[in-house]
Amino acid sequence: MSFLHWAILIPFLFAIIVPMLYKYIRPVHTGWFILIVPSVLFVFFLPYINPVADGETFMETVPWVPSLGINFSAFIDGWSLLFALLITGIGALVVLYSIYYLDKKYEDLTNFYVHLLMFMGAMLGVVLSDNVIVLYVFWELTSISSTLLISYWYHRDASINGALKSLNITVLGGFAMLAGFALLYVMTGTFSIQEMIGQAGGVIDHPLFLPTIILILLGAFTKSAQFPFHIWLPDAMEAPTPVSAYLHSATMVKAGIYLVARFTPLFGGAPEWFWIIAGGGLLTLLWGSLSAIRQKDLKGLLAYSTVSQLGMVMCLLGLGSAALYFDDANELYTVAILAAVFHLFNHASFKGSLFMTAGIVDHETGTRDIRALGGLMLVMPATATISLIGAASMAGIPPLNGFLSKEHFFMAITDATEYGIFNMETAGMLFPVIGWLASVFTFVYCCIFFFKTFAGPFEPERFAKKVHEAPIGMLISPAVLGLVVVIVGIFPNLLSQSIIEPSMAAILQGLPTDAEAFTVDIEHWHGFDLELFMTIGVVGFGSLLYLAMGKWRKLSIYNKTTDPFSPVYDSGITGLLKGSRLITNVQMTGRLRDYLTFVSAFFLIITIWTMIRYDAFVIDTQNISEISTYEVVLVGLLVISMLALPFIQQRVAAIVVLGFVGFLIALFFVNFRAPDLALTQLLIETVLVILFMLAFYHLPEFRKEKMKASFKWSNALLSFGVGLMVTLIALSAFSYGQGHDFSPVSDYYIENSADLAGGYNMVNVVLVDFRALDTVLEVLVLGVAALAVVALIRLKMKEGDDI
Amino acid sequence: MSIVVGVSFMVGTYLIMARSLLSVVIGLNMLAHGSHLLLLTMAGLKTGAPPLLDRPETAFSDPLPQALILTAIVISFGITAFTIAIAYRTYKVYQTDDLEQLRGSPDE
């Protein structure tokens, strides 16, 4: 166990301690203790920056199931380090924020912090695991903890629904991903990601390549809320705001992006990989930004904006994967990866701060409806300032970091048309056009977010609470993130060597990393080029659109806020429930007859199929023992009396016949040289008849069976089938045994029972000596049955009592 | 012998699908008989003397299936006794032995 493993496990360990802290140290908000965990881990990960920037990677392995090649390997390179820092850094800020957001008197802090820590550990596990199976386990743990956190206010229906939706969608994707990993194992023979990348050669040409990437991308797309799986994210906004800021914008939803980038060295360069990711991302970008405009709920707006920004990063990763097709690091492609990494970081910073300010607005005013909000600028100046920074960065206004990454985004999508592969010279024209359009919409919703909340006249009577500025503790976290936005915006190259270059090197593994294209130098001013004009166009058109809002806000499409894909999901779920209920009702009738029919019919079908399939019907007439007249009479009597049983209408007669059958069988045992069996059978049969008689004294007379003729016939047919089948099996098995030389186990008993056990009756010796334990258990079974019988008869229960 | 086994299975299957609890019990018993005979038949019939060592013969019938059947007879007796008791109890509580009327509520 190295320190890296402990870093993953510490959050889980703390999650166990939390309830005790909560119980015994009541006066202090539990969050203060939790704050230690991400802060310490953040400091712990910081020293990795320098060696990783120099190109080092760290791999620590602890065997877990070595026989299957499953090891708990922790791996750090630039890309996972970026995530680890984001998870712990933003985690610390979110915990700090939650201390003020959640009231220790009224809220159930145990649940919150246990699940939050569980998530933190799981997410660290996802980004630090090198083994795909371990990664999958942590991946599902993040889904589960996310669900638990969304349903934190579990008394609300909306929370439960949102939680279930996110669970269904992300776990479905996760499961597909597991199948994808299994296929990967088939192709490469290893579960370690780095080993797979080491032998990337044959994967792309493998026939399983396409199913594999589709399954893995299903996992990534559902987790990262890509179109059309994005519908769970807006509903996840029922979670407390710290959770939304942490899981649903900064970290968990980026797990899909992490995965795509992680597998880029393996799959990158294939046209399918390129188009699914770039195309899916582009569509998500446009859809998310359009839907965000229609939202009336502050957090809903931010959710759709997250969807859209995630789509943008995804699209960039898709574009950047082209670099592996050419196998050289030309700036034409690497700029896409650069933009993806840079924007990922920027998005975490500005979206985190925006979520927190939205939470403050909600907390202080009691509403998140933008139609009710307005004029808060003067009442909450600090919150307004932080929001302005965040929104402006998201809209892409210089000199903030959002502007820089958006410039690179434009650069990447305009460069993309020049790739000259994968039909990019024709279909690729869509990228700049759609990307630019989506940016205009992004600008519009940023305006809506800021101006509708903070600008305009302030009318205190519209709010249920007395509105005032948030406490200083609540402002620290968004302010820190806002500061990051500004500082990175002004000095972008602070990050370029330490974070961005190593991340790019990790994503584009295998390319010559010393190439010039890996030297990141982010500048504000590129001269009057296309990107600058695109930005100017975005600001210009966006402002026009926002100012013209009065005209289009009446449109019906604006007033509907539900996503058109949500009903698809809903009807899918209700359909599934109805369907399974239907199947269950057909099958679970509550009639014994039906169940037995299913069992016997299934037995019949499966044995007939097997027999025919393997051509097993053999009837061998050799070696059968000679039959005497005495035996013929016995058989005749037995068959007749057995066949008569179902037709007997009187219970006494039935019981007599049953006893008769039993005694006949005892005679058979005598005839077949089994004296012990005959004795036992006689004894048991006598007791049984007496028992039946006793019971019959209390039970009603047989009624005439009122059964439909068709039922009767189908029963008879089925029984006949079963009987015939058993006969055939018996005959075939016997013949098979004759045809092959099996030495029976019993020889051992025959030879040894006198010597070893000192008994001369072999059957007895087998029972009480060689297999004594079985016999003891048999006695136990009988004892239990006897107790149960006594209990059933003696137990005096009143009507309606339950056992 | 195999035919006898088949017949007993047939009758047993038919009876356990009947509506009366008692028929079900009798059917179970028939199935038990069937399987005992099946076991015995499979071992080969009349291959030698009874498996008693203090007798002069040297060829014996197979003792192992007999031991198995012995166990099975006893266990099946236990099961029959138990089901009879259940039938009795059910009749006491619900005043019927008709399985149609004993069906649970539809949402079980």
Image (cartoon, coloured by chain):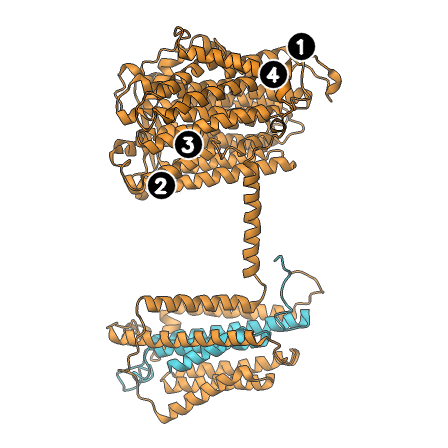
Chain colours: A orange, B cyan
The first of marks 1 and 2 along the sequence is: 2
- Label 3: which residue? A126
Q: CA distance from mark 4 to mark 2?
A: 47 Å
Residue A115 % position (x, y): 54, 33
In the rendered structure, which amino acid carries the disc numbered 2?
A: Pro
Q: CA distance from mark 1 to mark 2?
A: 56 Å
Q: Residues within 10 Å of mark 4 (few under 14, many from 20)?
A: few
Left or right: A492 in relation to A542: left
Instruction: Describe the element under mark 3 as helix, strand or loop.
Output: helix
- Label 1: which residue? A378
- Label 2: which residue? A211
Front-most of residues A409 and B63: A409
Q: CA distance from mark 1 to mark 4?
A: 25 Å
The first of marks 3 and 2 along the sequence is: 3
Viewer-side label of 1, 4? 4
Viewer-side label of 1, 2? 2
Q: Residues within 10 Å of mark 1 (few under 14, many from 20)?
A: some
